[in-house]
Every structure is written in C-alpha cells, then in structure tokens.
Amino acid sequence: MNKAELIEALADKAGVQKQSAKQLLDAYIDIVTEKISQKEEIVIVGFGTLTPRSQNTRLARNPKTGTPVQIPARTTVKFKPGKFLLQAMNGKK
C-alpha cells in the first residue's frame, strides 16, 4: 500500500473527503517526524510503539572490494507492535 492508497482507505473508513484525509495523514507524519527527531517515543496503545534508537559508528566492509568502510553514527526508529495488532495479524480476537 502506498501513500495514495492509504489516503483513499482512510477517507473511506472515516467517511471524509480525500483532501481531509491527506491533510490528516500529512499532519500525522509531520508530528511523528518532529517527535522522533527530538528523541521522543510515540506510543499508540494497542497498535505499537515507535522508539528512536541511536546506532554507534561502526566498521563495515564493501562487499564488492572488501575495503573497510566507516559507517557514521545515526538515529533510526524501532517499531514494536502492540498486543492488539499482533492478535489481528495472527487471526485472534
């Protein structure tokens, strides 16, 4: 599912126009991006948790040449699914 399909599904499910659904989705993405960049955890009860995670600088190898390459430190996002999402994925109610 891409963003356009998600907007369409959101509009249908919520009974709103696609433009409103797009604005809501864009606002959600902006808020999540802002909070994660501020290293804040986002918890949506029953759905899951988005947690910013720091990765240290590490040494890797170029698979083509075998040359060592330094990968700089960065922040990534870890998603831990919630109980209800896991149950829905596994066909349980």
Image (tube, helix red, strand yellow):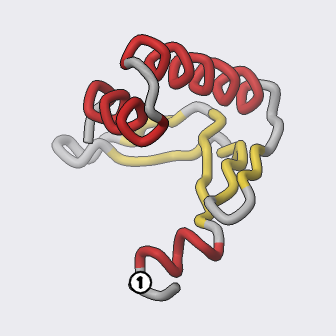
Q: Which element is circle 1 on?
A: loop
Residue 82 lies, with reference to residue 72, above or below; the image says below
28 over 57 or under it: above or below: above
Q: Is residue 16 above or below residue 64?
A: above
Q: Look at the image and tell me in which quarter the N terminus lies.
A: top left
Which residue position is annotated with label 1?
90
Q: Position of residue 83 (x, y in %)?
A: 64, 76
| Residue pictured at 36% horizontal, 36% vertical | 12
Pinpoint residue 19: horizontal percent, then vertical percent: 41, 11
Q: Position of residue 62 (x, y in %)?
A: 29, 42
Q: Amino acid at mark 1?
A: Asn
- Give the crowd class for mark 1: few <14, some 14-19, many >=20 residues within 10 Å: few
Instruction: Indicate left or right for 62 with 25 as reference.
Output: left
Percent of width and height locating residue 75: 65, 36
Q: Residue at x 37, y 18 (%)?
A: 18
Q: Left or right: 21 with respect to 45?
A: left
The number of discs equals: 1
Toward the front, the furthest residue is: 15
Q: State the residue in front, 14 or 56.
A: 14
Is 87 drawn above or below residue 1 in the view shown?
below
Q: Which residue is depicted at the point 45% across and 25% down?
A: 16
Furthest-left residue in this view: 64
Residue nearest the observer in this picture, 49 or 45: 45
Point 62% across, 60% down: residue: 47
